Amino acid sequence: LDGIPLALELAATWAQVFTPAQMLLRLRGRFEWLSSRQRHAVPHHQTLQAAIDWSYELLSPDLRRFFTQLSIFRGGWSLEAAEVICQEPMALDYLAQLRECSMITTEEQHDEIRFGMLETLREYADQKLLPEERSRLKRRHLEYFVELAETLSEDGPQSLYLNRLGADLENLREALRWGLNHSPQDALRLSLALVDFWTIRNYWDEGLQVSERAFERCADIPDELLVQALLKIGILAYHCGDLDRGERNLRLSLDLSGDLGDRRTVCASIYHLAIVSFMRDKREEMRCLLEQSLALARELNYRRMIGACLLRLGELMAEDGDLERAEPLFRESLRIAREIRSTHGVATALLHLGRHLVNRRRAEAQTLLEEALSLFKELQDHASISVVQVLLGQMAFKKGDMKTARSYYLLSLESAQKTIFKNYAYKPIYGLARIEMVEGRLERAACLLGIASLYAKPSDAEELEASLQEIIGEAELREAFEAGRLMNQEQALLYCFREIP
């Protein structure tokens, strides 16, 4: 009902004869159903349709036409989008007039005024569009967002790319839906331009599904687009955990880009194959691939890929205990990321550097991780936010600051719920269990370890078992562990967030 007073009043008259669920079903046809049974009411208060008709008829013909065209948008729009898609040079003046008569709304987002429309009004306006006009607007809507996404992905700061596309997410989804049925190649171009957005904002599944559907519906794909489709669908596939499909696509991308002489895509394909090797725990294979990709990236002055390779090579060295060699690589990666204005690259380099300085230069590590956390929050990368919050919780735990540690672990668990990966919840829950062990609440600690086991990866088993052996001796503690292990997700989360008496 969009909070419209008349709509609420009209719906309320049926409250004695329909349950809320029944009313909700009928509200799908809101204009037909929402009418007053009080025939003495003024005409434009008798039905929702009549009320909106009355406001609509007060508009000038040009303003009515523009208002109906705006129904093409979902979730809001910018002035530029209205000017281009509606092909209206008077867009600014018309938007101001529509705002004055409350037919549209305004909101400031990221230093830009965005416009919106209540869904009730959008549906009404959409009904006024002729099929041919709707089709023309849909095509211009798709073309506009293809150009916007491709331009932002190729140039400018990453934060602008993410914020601008994030604000238009519903428009992007609508453009993709229409494009899949009417212009699959444009839908494919759009989905590929969104790959960084899909991955950083944790929309891996959605990105993979729409990219594959567009790819499958394209009858004839130019080689330049085909090679990018193979590369980026491969990236999305391994992010979703399908390593076989990811590797298969990346190898096809490598072969085709080699045939085309597209050396930047060769470089990127090798790098992402290295990540697949990492996920398969093939460290030496990963190292060799990274060195190949880095050598080619330096030759091409492909700075984004230079920074990515340095970061991953540094991580391998740090995990081998060679921080002396790893630290310069992390710092060079950080410098490059700052220079090319890759916010995610900066945040990731800060995370890796901070994580490996924790046991050497704690104060510096704290500063680096806090900066990384701030940037990941700006990017809305919930998976990385969760990781950094765990690290800050672990630092507080080692200092004996259990209150701060608990706070970070709970924040990390909250962030983990916003990702598609269940295992991100393991570390914060395990951290909470360690706090309970230190503070002597062993039954609660055992229950939390049981919950943690629900999210544990095979590599976590040894750590989990060691903690269990520290406390489990008595039968009631074993029962507490089993009680945690048998909880469903809702029960487990409620238990984790429950306040300590």
Image: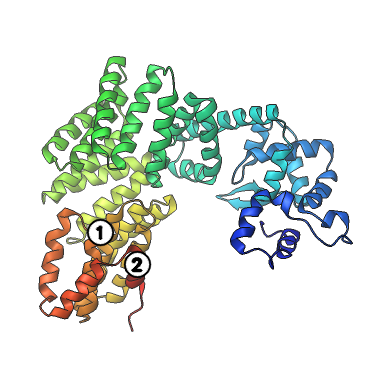
Quadrant containing the C terminus is bottom left
Element on which disc 1 rests = helix
Apparent side of residue 314 relative to residue 151 in the rendered image (left or right): left
Count neighbours of disc 1 (C-alpha within 10 A) and say few if under 14, some if 14 to 19, many if 20 or more. some
Apparent side of residue 499 relative to residue 55 in the rendered image (left or right): left
- Tell me the amino acid under the disc marked 1: Tyr
Name the residue rendered at 33%, 58% in the picture.
386
Please tell me in which quadrant of the rendered image residue 313 appears: top left
Q: Do the residues bearing badges 1 and 2 touch, measured as CB atoms within 8 Å?
A: no
Quadrant containing the N terminus is bottom right
Image coords of residue 275 (percent x, y): 23, 38
Count neighbours of disc 2 (C-alpha within 10 A) and say few if under 14, some if 14 to 19, many if 20 or more. some
Q: Is residue 242 visible?
A: yes
Image coords of residue 208 (percent x, y): 38, 37
Q: Is residue 195 visible?
A: no
Q: What's the mark number on residue 455?
A: 1
Image coords of residue 404 (percent x, y): 32, 72
Name the residue rendered at 79%, 39% in the picture.
63
- Tell me the amino acid under the disc marked 2: Leu
Element on which disc 2 rests = helix
Apparent side of residue 127 relative to residue 388 in the rendered image (left or right): right
The residue singled out by tag 2 in the image is 493
Name the residue rendered at 32%, 70% in the picture.
496
- Taking depth in this image into account, of 197 and 244 the one nearest to the observer is 244
Q: Label 1 vs label 2: CA separation?
A: 12 Å
Work out whether 179 lies above or below 469. Answer: above
